[in-house]
Image (cartoon, rainbow, N blue to C red):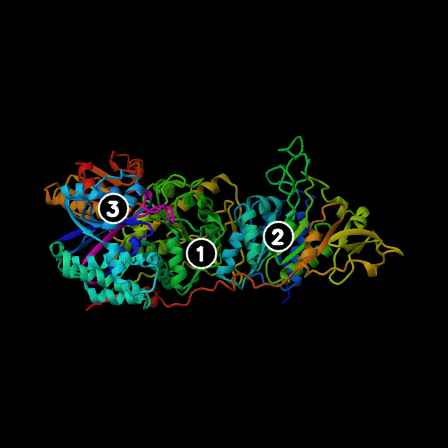
Amino acid sequence: MELTAKDFQSAEEVRWCPGCGDYSILKQFTEVLASTGSDPDRTVVVSGIGCSSRLPYYVDSYGIHSLHGRAPAVATGIKLANPDLDVWIITGDGDALSIGGNHLIHALRRNLNVPILLFNNEIYGLTKGQFSPTSKEGQVTKSTPRGSVDHPLNPLTLALGAGATWVARSMDRNPAHLRDQLAKSQAHQGSALLEIYQNCNVFHDGAFEVWTDKSTQALHSVFLEAGKPIAWGGTEPTYALAWNGGRPEIRELGSEFGLADAWVHDPSDRLKAFALAALEGPLRPFGVLYAAERPVFAASHQAGTRPLHDVLHSGRTWTVE
Amino acid sequence: MRSVVVLLAGDSGDGIQLLGGQIVRAAAQSGRDVRTLSDFPAEIRAPQGTVSGVSGFQFRIASDAIHDPGARADCLVAFNAAAYTKYVGQLKPGGLLLAATEGFDARSLALAKLPADADLLASARERFRVLEVPVKDLTLGALAEVSLGQRDKMRARNMLVLGILTWMYSMPAAGLETELRALFRGDETNILAYKAGLNFAETLEVQDYRVELEQHGVERGTFKTINGSHAVALGLAAAAHQLGKPMLYSSYPITPASDILHELAKLQPEHVTVFQAEDEIAAVTSALGASFAGGLGVTASSGPGLSLKAEGLGLAVMTELPLVLIDVQRGGPSTGLPTKTEQSDLAQALHGRHGEAPLPVLAARSAADAFDTTLLAVKIAVECMTPVIMLSDAYIAGSAQPWRIPEVSELPSITPPRGSAGEELYARDAHGVRPWVIPGTPGGAHRIGGLEGEVGTGRISYEPANHQAMVTARAAKVQAAARLYGPLEIVQCCPDADTLVLAWGSTYGAVRSDMERRAAAGQSVDYIHLRHMHPLHPDLKATADRYRRVVVVEMNEGQLAHHLQGEWARPVESVCKTTGQPFTTEELAELWN
């Protein structure tokens, strides 16, 4: 019997603020679980603490709402005990990048076979509005009334630097794109870091509007596809990126510079993935920036096989008759 | 009974611990009982020849069963002036000083910050019997034909001393030679030095110093020498076997707990996966993840690592998942004395979590006992669905003793609770234990977490009465763990005693020897050595109530004494010290009466 998204929705009352971007992410997530034929008996959703980390309660599978920042470590233990389970990590910018930064980078470098869905809203929501590691410089929050002075972290360059084998970005307000990226993250063998721009309409409304709103999206968001020129601007692209000696350059398409001259996206190129991830200005790439193959963690951590009798009698022994 | 206490001391690079380990194994194999005590610097290679770089290894060999490594030494083997300076106070008047001649030259005196004209050996002769051995010359002489530099040859000095001691304490020399051949895989250098020491002792100089120790009647079986770290590793391997499920041993390097990690990584027992985590927090939370997934998570730490794991323990209490934390206590707080022993984590183990978060706490008393206590810790964790802390310490971790290897059929059963999907997640059995429904169980999908759960269902609940009910239920479940304890063991019972001595952990050997001495001297005292720190043994209070005096002996500032006074609302006397060194029997005799 084929399951539907409804079969993956638990009976728990969903308690995010009305208008929160998390609703869309939950909806796309359950739809993807259904469309990819996930088995609720073998699916485990692991989270830390924060608004995003409430998600496992709303999904009718196995789930554990663990400790602030610790989801990657909990998931590591789950995978070591049973590598056959389909484990997902749900986290946020504070959870993954501040209190849990250490666990995140080590899960990535080990290539733990788990998609990591990082809901980035550039704010601490559940604790009611303090600046987060991704908050912009100057961002006014409850704990930075004169503006944040901290330079923000870029989750994607961090992930690439930590040795992630799959790095992508999507957004709450583009359900089709989000579903596609979620399915790809699940299909990847290894750590798949998917940053999801998620609007917190209470404490940091409109943070990503320029990239998510239909009126501005075409000019500022570029949707990457492997093997295709990196171009944007409308139904017919008007701009494209050039790989100018290692520096991404925005070019207007025309007689001087055509699509054939544009940078063709190759997700296996780590250097170029860094360049895309490092685009922090008005232009933002979405989609899979980087995808590579490397042996997955847990495959290399097999349980021992030595029988107990041999273990007990290991080393030098003597017998008294 | 006859016993001798020998203290080996030299540079941390002199191979003192290896020398000690070999001699202990030889003594145990020859049917003597043995206990040891290591004392080494926290630095890997402390400055050579200095007092801070001295490494010590004490052992006691006896013709009958003993419980402690002894107090003052009958023999001090000093490789250099610094070693002599550090330990001479522990040598009995009239005892034997075996001094490596070259270690008392001008350079050695300077390194030990002693005046150039200090004649240590001359003054030693006034108080001790002194046997000067030109260890360097004998070693180089024995290795004259070996094509190695002098520096490399000198590494075999400890084997030369091993030869001398083997003869002095009448241990089986041929058996030891076979052992050394296996250990050094055919490298003759060490064997040559060992034999030279043996010959030197036999033919020349040390006839007067030979000590004959009878072989005591040991039980039958197959034996090995174990220290506390090896014993815990074997205990975990045995527990995993009895449980028949995956075990994840997850830990972060820290002294002195790391040796358990090394042992398990080397042993590769079936069912056991070893994982070195990125930090202490990841170690405990990955262990908990394994328990959620249906394996058993085990972690270990020492010192500050215990504090870092408190958060993870709280989640284990709340989610009611099995977890075992082995705390190899060391001197604290903070980095403290990383290689020294202490029992100062008891209060944190009992109480050191936010919220009402009780959990069972056990304490091992010796290396051999650490095997049994580890098995009990796993049994309680799994059968009661709770995290368990097992306390060991640096002394137990590093001290060696002979141990009869048990048959697999002798091991206790470990039975997981029910795990079918039909029941409510937090439905409790007669002992208050919830089911363990593991991911992969058809129809068993559920969510757990750190938020308070509803009675029965486990769904999130902030209801006041529900929180009270869950707090009470979790505590009652932990109390019910006492059903898995054996009978209360009274170690020593004198007729009509009015004083009860309570001790726990690694003080066992010293306190027991002290009790035997007191009984022999006509003092009427009974003694119970606690293994169950929480919940206390159900018969303990009624037993203690029969005594006018209760004396609590421990290596901290009175943590168990305070705890018992709180639990029992009666005064107890506290005998304690916090020096980073274990009690000696002599010390205990002076500390209370």
Look at discs 1 and 3 and give the one toward the viewer. Answer: 3
Residues behind callouts 2 and 1 on a single chain: no
Residues A43 and B255: in front is: B255
> What numbered label is drawn on residue B435?
1
Which residue bears the numbered disc 3? B104
Residues behind callouts 2 and 3 on a single chain: no
In this rendering, the answer to whether B276 lies above or below B189 is: above
> What numbered label is drawn on residue A112?
none
> What numbered label is drawn on residue A161?
2
Q: Is residue B157 left or right of residue B305?
A: left
Instruction: List x then y, in percent, for residue B89.
Output: 21, 41
Q: Quadrant of the C terminus of chain B?
A: top left
Question: Upstream in the sequence, badge 1 or badge 3?
Answer: 3
Instruction: List x then y, in percent, for residue B173.
Output: 20, 64
For the residues labelled 2 and 1, the Cα–Cα distance comes to: 42 Å
Q: Secondary structure at mark 1?
A: loop
The span picked out in magenta is B28-52
Q: Is residue B565 left or right of residue B454?
A: left
Callout 1 crowding tier (Cα within 10 Å): few <14, some 14–19, many ≥20: many
Instruction: List x then y, in percent, for residue B394.
Output: 33, 48
**Residue B217 appears in the rendering:** yes
Q: Amino acid at mark 1?
A: Pro
